[in-house]
């Protein structure tokens, strides 16, 4: 049996094939051309236990192409792979071999390969979040300008609604007015694009049963439910609520020995979009749900607001796991008993 590892870069890949004794039987650096990579792997296709690809920013084309060609493809979770620090020399070839080596030993940390049709919608939701962050930067810029000019800020809603007439009514110096107009024009453009994306996303997830369940959770509306549904993919890939909460970055990452903290783990290991969604859900739940507010206040009295908010996010994440597993709507008594 043979094993293959691919060290993927932006414009080339190192492809390595090893046997069950870790002997390299074939290895080559190839341009990122699917046809050439498939041709290189073809002689070993029938004997390959699997092909391991790094989970980098540009893996879609390679993984989808290998799967379409009939290869068993595994996506390596690079944040969970720890190489021996004492190596005197390492390079792209040793990285590719190491992926194949972990696969042979059966200890390869893997990520989930979502179907392309689900990934496209999920990436659209991530694009929406990127545009919202960009719009926020321009809103804050207008707030800062008005604070410098008038000694107080306008609200974010006022900044989003600024037009030529409103800017003229501020009676600001010409250069300052031009700066605000530039920000306002970008805000208007981004708002239009965000509305378009939100409409498409709503169409894609409206009939999803998980989406309907999630909207019953305090603090989770249409936007957050959309993000959570698309980032999860299938709840069946999580063995228990603890694993799901860890993936959503809602648990502590620390190393303990004899009851004492000895260090921290990889705090970035998990899904940053789910982490954001559940913290946002906690913020809204504190404002609009009395039970969630009481839970938050009890935690805050013993710790601090940041830890208390994270604890509420953790509780909501675990509740969502059980809801999606059991196909039941949110139960206030069960969550905040």
Image: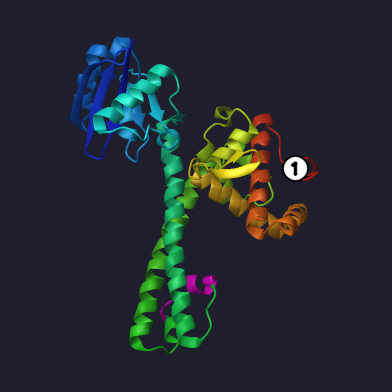
- Residue 333 location (% of width, % of height): 80, 43
Q: Which of 257 and 122 is in front in this view?
A: 257
> What residue is shown at x 35% (from left), y 74% (from top)?
182
The way the protein has been coloured in the rendering is rainbow
**Viewport quadrant of the N terminus:** top left
Asked whether 131 or 38 is in front, the reply is: 38
Residue 157: say if magenta: yes
Q: Residue at x 21, y 18 (%)?
A: 26
Residue bearing the label numbered 1: 335
Find residue 37 and report its image quarter: top left
State whether residue 92 appears in this view: yes
Would you place residue 187 above or below residue 266 in this image? Answer: below
| Magenta segment main secondary structure | helix
Asked if residue 83 is among those painted magenta in the image, a careful observer would answer: no
Q: What stretch is highlighted in magenta?
A: 156-164
Q: In this view, does 204 lie above or below 133?
A: above
Mark 1 residue element? helix
Dot 1: within a 10 Å radius of its alpha carbon, few (fewer than 14), some, or many (20 or more) residues? some
């Amino acid at each position: 049996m043979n094993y293959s590892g691919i060290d993927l870069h932006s414009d080339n890949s190192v492809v390595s094939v090893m046997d069950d004794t870790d002997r390299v039987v074939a290895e080559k650096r190839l341009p990122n051309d699917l046809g050439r990579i498939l041709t290189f792997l073809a002689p070993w296709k029938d004997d390959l236990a699997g092909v391991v690809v790094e989970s980098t920013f540009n893996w879609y084309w390679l993984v989808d192409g290998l799967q379409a060609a009939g290869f068993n493809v595994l996506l390596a979770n690079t944040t969970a792979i720890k190489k021996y620090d004492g190596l005197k020399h390492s390079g792209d070839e040793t990285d590719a071999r190491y992926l194949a080596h972990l696969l042979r030993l059966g200890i390869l940390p893997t990520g989930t390969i979502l179907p392309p049709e689900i990934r496209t919608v999920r990436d659209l939701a991530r694009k929406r979040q990127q545009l919202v962050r960009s719009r926020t930067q321009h809103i804050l810029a207008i707030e800062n300008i008005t604070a410098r000019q008038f000694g107080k800020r306008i609200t974010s809603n006022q900044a989003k609604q600024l037009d030529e007439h409103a800017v003229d009514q501020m009676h600001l110096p010409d250069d300052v007015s031009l700066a605000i107009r530039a920000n306002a024009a970008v805000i208007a453009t981004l708002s239009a694009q965000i509305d378009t994306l939100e409409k498409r996303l709503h169409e894609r997830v409206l009939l999803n049963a998980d989406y309907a369940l999630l909207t019953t959770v305090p603090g989770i509306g249409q936007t957050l439910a959309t993000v959570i549904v698309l980032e999860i993919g299938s709840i069946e890939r999580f063995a228990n609520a603890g694993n799901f909460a860890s993936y959503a970055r809602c648990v502590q990452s620390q190393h303990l020995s004899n009851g004492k903290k000895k260090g921290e783990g990889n705090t970035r290991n998990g899904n940053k979009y789910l982490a954001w969604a559940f913290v946002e859900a906690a913020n809204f739940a504190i404002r609009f749900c009395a039970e969630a507010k009481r839970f938050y206040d009890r935690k805050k009295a013993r710790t601090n607001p940041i830890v208390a908010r994270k604890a509420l996010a953790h509780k909501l994440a675990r509740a969502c796991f059980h809801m999606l597993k059991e196909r039941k709507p949110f139960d206030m008594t069960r969550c905040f008993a």
